[in-house]
Image (cartoon, grey):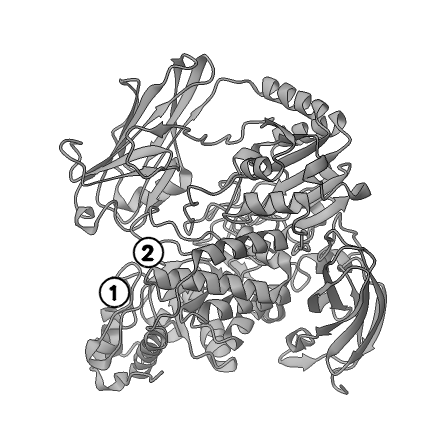
Amino acid sequence: MNAPDITTLPLDEQALFTAGASMWSTHEVPALGVRSITMADGPMGIASGRVDERDVSLLTPCPIALGASWDLGLIARVGALVGGDAVARGVQAVLAPNVNLARSPLAGRAFEYFSEDPMLTGVAGAAWATGLQSTGVASVTKHLVCNDSETQRDTIDIVVDERALREVYLLPFEYAAAAGAGGMLTAYNRVNGSWCAEQHHVITDIVKGEWGFAGVLMSDWFGTHTTAPTLNAGLDLEMPGPARFLGAHADAAVASGDVPRARVADAAARVATFAARFASAGDTTDVEDAEALLVEAAAAGFVLLRNDDDLLPLDPARAGTIAVIGPNAAAPCYQGGTFAKIAVKPDALRPLDAIHARFAGATILYEPGVDPQPRLPAMPVTPARDLGDGAVGMTLDYFDDDSFTGTPRHSETRATNSLVWFVGVHDQGAWDRPAGIRASGWYRPERDGEHIFYLGATGAVRMRVDGGEVLRHDETVAASDVMGRLKSGEADSVAVTLEAGRSVLVEVEFRHQPARVQGLWFGVRVPITPEEMLVRAVAAAEAADTVFLILGETSDASVESKDRADTRLPEAQLALAHAVLAANPRVVIVTNVGHAFDATFAETAPAFLVAWYPGQEFGRALAEVLAGDREPGGRLPVTLARDEADYPALALAPDASGKLVYEDGVRIGYRGLAMRGIAPLHGFGSGFGYTRFTLDAARIGDFVVHACVTNRSARAGHVVVQVYRHSPEFALVGFAKAFLAGEATGNVEVALEPRALRSWADGWQSLTNIGLSVGFAADDLPIRLLFDPVRA
């Protein structure tokens, strides 16, 4: 890569580099060979930057599921998979990974964080970024820094001491910098009084100065507030374009003497070098290989926490009658509710479908037990017209104007009931004028009675059922209010009496106005009472030999821009779990969640599996794990406490002055519990597959712990050996995942992380005479060692 010489450009042209050219692209200068870079959001796949959700990209396991794998090689392969998908879509930079920390289990975007531990997050994020960049696509690591919660994230001021800032919250970014990430994305919040886009101490003193980071520092979208303070703090690129505060404004700031000319030249050079480095593309993704990898990655993150009497795996040939119960069996949560949401491929197997296929010889009973979609139910329809694509769902017709007359410009079939268009509705030509979309499909009720229909949109919309208008909303939403409407997801509802077996045509007409983002959502709820659903589920459990109880969340339970109120699953699901556990002694509980949660309800379950948000291949991965084709390979990347009060940080609301003080300091997560002598329900790093291991001995030499491990099972499987220091705080300093054959003994080498063997006190201080513990989890460490890095 030859860096372009931007010094030949006049100041006004250099200044243009400091702001994006459009929503998702940078400026180009053909005369210097500087191409425009197209960016897209992440980290679960290639989101945004596309015309709309019709462009279905790969949906990988969420970062917390990848962190649960404790497998850096696998995480790098997933990063490369996303990179290949980016290349196929003409994207040169991805806003990912997210290396903020799951400081509180209430954090709305905890599913996007690899772990509560800064070292595990750092090495996992660096592995993902390295994999992505192996395809020639840039990793823009986010969100710098302390964007660890969503409550008032646009205004909140995080107050954090220097030691915690460096040892905990900046550490994952330091790993990303060392891995050569192409850029970093500054957060919306403030840190110690300064907006993150204006945080000179972080951006210039530490990232660019101490770390020598040569990449580009860019703002999160609309995350800038000023011109001179932002440039002088060290920010290089304001996104999106056109410029609001930088760009041509930078030229004026230099002319007025508020910004040094050299600062603008430096920013322009960094952006131009970034563009030159990542302008070329690598290989595209092989779809078949992609699906196999996504099954592997999902299963690798599943964490088995209980398996009494080896209830799992269940032999499909001897399964007898299986009751599949729970809302997430048929309505799984593949990902969290982020603006980087990926449209799930139409043929993705739900857990229920995959269990039917893998346990084909068994009798399968299914009952949801509770309402599977309490906020916005699905719209299970057949297309109004057969477009010959074999797809299911609503027929969507796109019109050039909002009269819904004439021949549609484009038609397609969509399986989702929640649509978002980030760039334009059906082409760029319709972006700047009112236009219309009609969604239509045939709904066949299974029951007589009142069905509740739902409808919401970012513009004027109406719904007809069986020819009659039932809902209408004529408000034209201003462009500035569109994101608020999308965040709230408001929907009107109405009861319509339908007859079982008699199909009715459901039509939705959406008149959208020019705006950057548009959304449309709809659904129908069948007439069945909660009491009846519970009774049917208990009856199924009583009639079965084994129960797979699949509980969890909907995608609006973990959302960008909002934190959770508590760590509990919905009360109706907890009641369902207690009833099913009382009805059958052989219950496997599977939890489909994206964060640390209250797991006390599962303590009496014979088998308990945490599946996280595992991406598009959730169904296949789960069925293969339940049947024993694969092992659940994960270990907890977060602590599951016995009580919410045990977490070192829980409440996320700022005080009256807008400040949120990180009072836990460096004692984040499991560290805080350990330092206070509080035993977790399930400790950080805990879990097991279908094998059992013993740690026979351990010794240390040259920053490597050599652990002698024996597989006490006949089956081969994975083990994760973990090493923790005891001072100045209890903390993870190294780990290694290894595969051992059945009844085999092997040596597992755990390299200690040098960055975890230091502490900040007016400068970095190397730790000496460190007490180390070796084992399989933060609360399972049978061997103690003494290590002095200075003498090693």
329 and 481: which is toward the camera: 329
Q: Quadrant of residue 411?
A: top left
Q: Can you name the residue that lies furthest to the left here?
A: 406
Q: Residue at x 76, y 75 (%)?
A: 705
Residue named by callout 1 = 21
For residue 309, side relative to residue 86 (left or right): right
Quarter of the picture holding the N terminus: bottom left
Asked whether the viewer can see residue 123, the reply is yes
Query: Where the C terminus falls, by quadrant?
Result: bottom right
Q: Viewed as shown, does residue 542 lie left or right of 335?
A: right
Locate residue 220, reporting x and y percent: 39, 61
Relative image position of residue 209 (x, y in whole percent):
48, 81
Secondary structure at badge 2 equals loop
Residue at 64% from the left image edge and 80% from the top image edge: 764
Q: Which residue is mark 2?
A: 49
The residue lying at 44 percent from left, 45 percent from top is 344
Instruction: Give left or right: position of 429 versus 700.
Output: left
Find residue 163 and report its horizontal and vertical position in percent: 62, 71
Classify mark 1: residues with Cα within 10 Å, few (<14), some (14-19) or many (20+).
many
Q: Is residue 641 visible?
A: no
Closer to the eye: label 1 or 2: 2
Amino acid under label 1?
Answer: Ala
**Label 1 element class:** loop
Q: Earlier in the sequence, mark 1 or mark 2?
A: 1
The CA distance from mark 1 to mark 2 is 13 Å
